[in-house]
Image: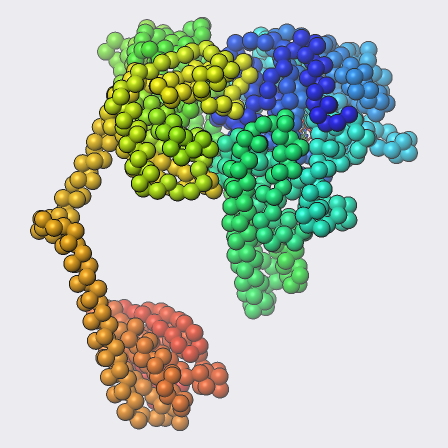
Amino acid sequence: MTSKEIRESFKVFFENKGHKVVPSAPMVTKDDPTLMFTNAGMNQFKDIILGHAEIKYPRVTDSQKCLRVSGKHNDLEEVGHDTYHHTMFEMLGNWSFGDYFKKEAIAWAWEYLTEVLKIDKDRLYVTIFEGAEAEGLERDNEAFDIWKSLIAEERILNGNKKDNFWEMGDQGPCGPCSEIHIDLRSDDERNTISGAELVNKDHPQVIEIWNLVFMQYNRKADGSLDTLPNKVIDTGMGFERLCMAIQGKTSNYDTDVFTPIIQSIATLTGVEYGSSKDTDIAMRVIADHIRTIAFSIADGQLPSNAKAGYVIRRILRRAVRYGYTFLGRKEAFMYTLLPILIEVMGEAYPELEHNRELIKRVIKEEEDSFLRTLEVGIRMLEGKIEELKAEGKETKLSGQDAFVLYDTYGFPLDLTALILHEQGLSVDEAGFDKAMQEQKSRARNAAAIDASDWQIVSEGESSFLGYKLDSCPTKILRYRKIVQKKKEFYQIVLSQTPFYAEMGGQVGDTGYLLDGEKKYEIFDTKSENKLCVHLMKKLPENLQANFTAQIDVVKRRKAEANHTATHLLHKVLRDYLGSHVEQKGSLVAPDLLRFDFSHFSKVEAEDLRKIEQIVNQRIRENVSLELFEDVTINEAKEMGAMALFGEKYGDEVRVVKYGNSVELCGGTHIKSTGAIGYFRIISESSVAAGIRRVEAVTGETAEKYAYEQEDLLNEVKQSFNNSPQLMTAIKKLIDEHTALNKQMEAIQKERIARLKAELLEEQREQNGVRIFIQNDVTPAIAKDIAFQLLGEVKEPFVFIGSGADSPDKCSLSLMISKDLVEQNSWNASTLLRSVAKHIQGGGGGQAHFATAGGRNAEGLKPATEQILSELNLS
Ligand code: ATP
Ligand code: MG
């Protein structure tokens, strides 16, 4: 079976068991503060499992793009070195939300593997949770009994809490799990050592393929467990590992998921896969990472220097570095693998083809810039090596230096160690680990969120009324305390609310909860797994009160105007620049809108103005809002909304339409475009390869911006005595300035020539060395004279130049002719540094010419004398 057929057969199997087949959610997460990337199939169903969203389909199946490179699941260091962990992989899964439980989940998994795929039962082992007495958790006898009816008892192994008890986080749904492992070794090997002994022992051919999680508890903040009202089945099977098993291979990279990519790398580099351990690892790293990078860019996560973007940047750099070190790739090459990746995966994941040009450009630019960094890093390391050798005693690079190389230049420790080793040096590994730990704990402390359990105040569901109302009566449903970065605040859920929670770029509302005369501030509103949470510094005294929830209307109206303006801008950009323009990021705040979009060159000022004019025209046309709620994606597309990837399954979308601007959008908007008033673009810049950013203001803020510009102009006019010909006056000033500069230069030259002539007339000489001393000159003039002397004076000489701007600002220059430097090993730089103490300063330079600056002009004379005496010239 090909990988495509395998993926398909899984979905068909579960579809026949009454499951709804849904698409993969994006790999980059949007609405979950605890997660940067989807790392398991269940992520997109978290809102359902937590009870924030209704269960539309009690049985669901899919193939989910996952990424395990940060947080709880981080396999990055393994990838490439082993043959069965990837950064990005596909997880096949089936779910039951309050529907079937262990019996069906186990029986169907078994049926699929052994009857549909016909995997040899003698190669399979399963694990069940052995229990944990300390926590009062029993052995999962229920699962054991079900397995016993399907598989020989000696193939059912006990597993501990670490491997066989799954938890969503410190709190929340959890439960025992049961894993299925496969033994892919040869018959000989299997006869020598039983597979049972190798399960969960990191053997590359005895590996876990499927994990069946039985969520039946809910863990509270104090660690205790409740039973979960709606039990959940959550299963996850590694697609690439399954392909390896079915296709009779012993490495994921030998399946048709990877061989075309590996083959392309081999062709590109002229290195055969299988020819050496190091080149094999490098090829696997590259084949794996190109998928991750391409998919995350397609999902909207570009490489950057912070958070999720930084994770992606590091992965790309890891691949480039392996290519550089082991495959001799000194120039960008990753981007050339994109066509083959699209060939392999483009059909199942059309977002790749759709973003082809963008992905290519972003990868290429990242590679180029990293290769430059890599070279700087190598030079830096070479500098360190020289220092170490010069010092002689230390033969170890400090852990801190190694860490800087790692963190800033992307040098893994093994590379640094390798380069050092070639020079007979080594690296302080313990020091490196320490620096790494320190950084990790800094990051952890910054991100740590300590949440208490939700306190229920009243029962009920929360609803959002903010599309229509600015205030409404409400009750508190629940609240909890959060401690983050030592700051305390509360999250509150209301029975109904006009507060818009930050989403789709539009910032969250602020406002108040009112209890009669009492007013309690809500400083922000956020969405967490579909739940709208209001953030408050202080809780109301009477939690049971009948409150009024009131948003800050002025701020909201301004944000709405900016949101609508963003839609108009998006449409005009597409019409004016071309349909390659797509939204790549957006911020809608009350005083500013920021719009990032794909476009491959700078938008020129005249085009920006044209775009601005068309948007303002739309505003003056006062186009009315047409709103369509609960339409299907297809209906929305027919209305002309842009096809957007990354909608979750079954989502009914909301379409916001102003004339020919049609967008899927959950934000709040104004009734007609006239309310925007006025639109001004204030900047255009680049955010990444192929991505431009426009910032703009509207309404009052735009008016203010225009006044600021006018004020500035008035100030300039005043500086020119309100000259009626302002531009002529400015130009005249510039011309005069240039002419004066020229004159200055000529005078300067003359002076230098005169000073030099005077110096040459003096015949002061000592030990066959001519001595030139010039007081009262600036460092620039001293330097000029020194180098002219160097060109003209044939015999050995020393030149000392000095001068002072004021008693506490002075300078000293020293030139020693090159023959003297060579013969006597004299060094102007060292000498000047040592006499600089007289002028309370410091300096340096080269062996034949150096300069120093200081704070004590009285020291110039003794400094000059010391120079002469040290050179035996006094
Ligand atoms: P392992 O111990 O092998 O790392 P895991 O316990 O982390 O696996 P789960 O979190 O249970 O795995 O994920 C479910 C399934 O996803 C696994 O059975 C495996 O087939 C697959 N899987 C997990 N991590 C990876 C990875 N990094 N690359 C490819 N497949 C993976
Ligand atoms: Mg793992």
| Total labels drawn | 0
Between residue 724 and residue 65, name the one nearer to us: 724
What residue do we see at 74% from left, 13% from top?
A: 108
Between residue 301 and residue 234, name the one nearer to us: 301
Q: Is residue 316 visible?
A: yes
Quadrant (top left/top right/bottom left/bottom right) for the C terminus: bottom left
Residue 376 image offset from top left, x and y in percent: 52, 56
Please indicate whether residue 774 sits to the left or right of residue 420 in the image. Answer: left
Quarter of the view holding residue 103: top right
Quadrant (top left/top right/bottom left/bottom right) for the N terminus: top right
Instruction: Work out whether 21 lies above or below 79.
Output: above
Quarter of the view holding residue 224: top right
What residue do we see at 31% from left, 11% from top?
A: 469
Please indicate whether residue 407 sits to the left or right of residue 621 in the image. Answer: right
Residue 860 image offset from top left, x and y in percent: 28, 77
Q: Is residue 437 visible?
A: no
Instruction: Work out whether 874 lies above or below 596.
Output: below
Quarter of the view holding residue 192: top right
Instruction: Work out whether 18 lies above or below 873.
Output: above
What residue do we see at 42% from left, 21% from top?
A: 663
What residue do we see at 72% from left, 19% from top?
A: 9
Image coloring type: rainbow
Residue 560 image offset from top left, x and y in percent: 32, 21
Residue 57 image offset from top left, x and y in percent: 59, 9
